[in-house]
Image (cartoon, grey):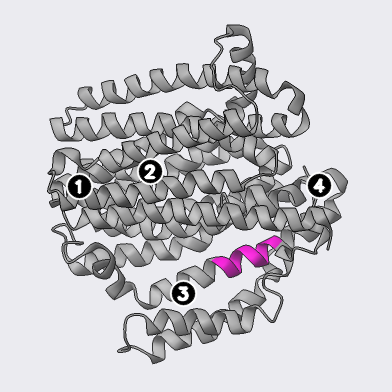
Amino acid sequence: MSGRSHSLSANSLAMAFGQLLGKGGFLAGLLVLSRYLDDTAFGALMFAVVLGQMLMLLVDAGVSIIANRQFSVDPEHRQQLMSTALGLRTVLGAGGLLLLVGASVLAGYGPLQLRYIAFIGLATVLDSFCELFYSIFRSSEKMIYEALVRAAGGLVSVALAVAVVGADMGRQWAMMPYISRSVAMFALGALVVRGGFATRVTPVFNTSHMRTLLRESVPMAIMGFMMVAVQKLDNVIIRSLIGVEAVGAYQECFRVAETMVVLITPTLLPGALFPALCRAFKKSWSEVRSRMAEIAQLVTGLALLVAVPLWSVSDRLLPFLWGESYRRGLEFGEVLLTFRLVLLAIPFVFWMNFLVASMVAGEKQRQAAWIGFAGVLASVGLNLLLVPRMGLPGAGTALVASNLLMCVLFYLELRREGPLPLLGQLWKPLVAAVPAVSAAVLLPDSPVYLRPLASAGLFAAVWLPAGGLRYLRSGDSRVTGAC
């Protein structure tokens, strides 16, 4: 096994560790607050978090990905690019935050909602600076620093959420864990960049350089915003048509699935999978077909390994995680069906991320942006059509349909370059899913933990010996090297 492959494997593990601790801590903080806040306050908090994630795409504008690439190929000019990127981020962050708060005031949101939006928006701007720090860590193949920063943020989220509840600080301070988390991550990331990489964290407002960087990043920004909008705009419609409490219930369903997405993005795609895709597109279409077929099998297996065990306890998981008030005033059957639809969307979300990475590796960012726009139109249209008729499950149905649509469109666009037989590679994870589903069916009244453990164990027992994780073996030369 080469030193390079060992380094990549270690970096991928470090990145996964940091993502899991960071996302896990974020989720754990929400779990604590969900038992403390009333339905209206919790819904308002979750809605602010959703808007914050949309703000991130506006503030980042695709610059982090471009910076990552340029830091990798031209480390000698890292300081100049970093200073320019920091300047651009300051301008976009301040403007985006003002735009978000101003739009929220015009929308007529109440004082509590505005307070949450303002503070979580500020936290999002700080998080966007951290993304630039991560670009330096990734380009230097020292992802352990990113893992440490994210882990610190996760721990602060949990600690401050417990403090808010323990001190009974009230709904007004429910956003404190998130702003504190972002401040801690920004401070630690800036300290590491300054001390460990000899790079100043000082913005430079050179209009010409900022305009050039923004122009280069725009296709990535559009594509990224469209991808996120597909999974976030539904919350705006839910709030308008059903109420802010329903946003809380929907986010409880969605957050469980979203936390699982760290298995594929950003852990694997910038780590083990994306560089191999880049090299494949540079070599030949036959190489692309081979790499994408193997990754399709891996992505499908990971998706089913997550979705099937969660489905097996879907009727008991939400109250176990979020407390007995998890329904937020809705009917049990309505929330359960929504959760199961969100779980059904997991394989399509995994595939969507995999195909987006393939589009970027093949330098098809502009086409990907148009497909993302089609996904947004489908999501908004389906939500407006289905939510009034089906209630909250209409949003889950729209989530499945819009992600499936984008998967099909991405696949068709990639196939324009040549034959791309991906579906024939799915038999291994699908065969492994049979005993996993059987375990869930045959253990209907078992303890809450037994069904998912048995389901996951049987899936892994069939899938792994068949080569389920072969593509990620550290000794495999296909996952070494740089883009």
Tell me the kind of residue under disc 2: Lys
**The disc label shown at residue 308, or none:** 3
Magenta stretch, main secondary structure, is helix
Q: Can you tell which of label 2 and label 4 is closer to the viewer?
A: 4
Residue at (80% x, 60% y) in the render:
290
Residue at (46% x, 16% y) in the render:
91
Magenta-drawn stretch contains 229:
no
Disc 2 designates what residue?
232
Q: Which sits earlier in the primary sequence, circle 2 or circle 3?
A: 2
Label 3 neighbourhood size at 10 Å, few (<14), some (14-19), many (20+)? many
Task: Point out residue 16 in the picture as x, y percentages from the top left corner.
Answer: 56, 56
Q: Which sits earlier in the primary sequence, circle 4 or circle 3?
A: 4
Boundaries of the magenta span: 295-302
Disc 4 element: helix
Task: Point out residue 226 in the picture as x, y percentages from the top left corner.
Answer: 49, 38
Location of residue 82 with respect to 156 vertically, above or below: above
Frontmost residue, 411 versus 351: 351
Q: Are marks 4 and 1 in contact (CB under 8 Å)?
A: no
Residue at (52% x, 82% y) in the render:
457
Disc 1 element: helix
Magenta-drawn stretch contains 298:
yes
Q: Are marks 1 and 2 in contact (CB under 8 Å)?
A: no
Q: Can you tell which of label 1 and label 3 is closer to the viewer?
A: 1
Label 1 neighbourhood size at 10 Å, few (<14), some (14-19), many (20+)? many
Marks 1 and 2, how far apart at CA:
27 Å
**The disc label shown at residue 279, or none:** 4
Disc 1 designates what residue?
164
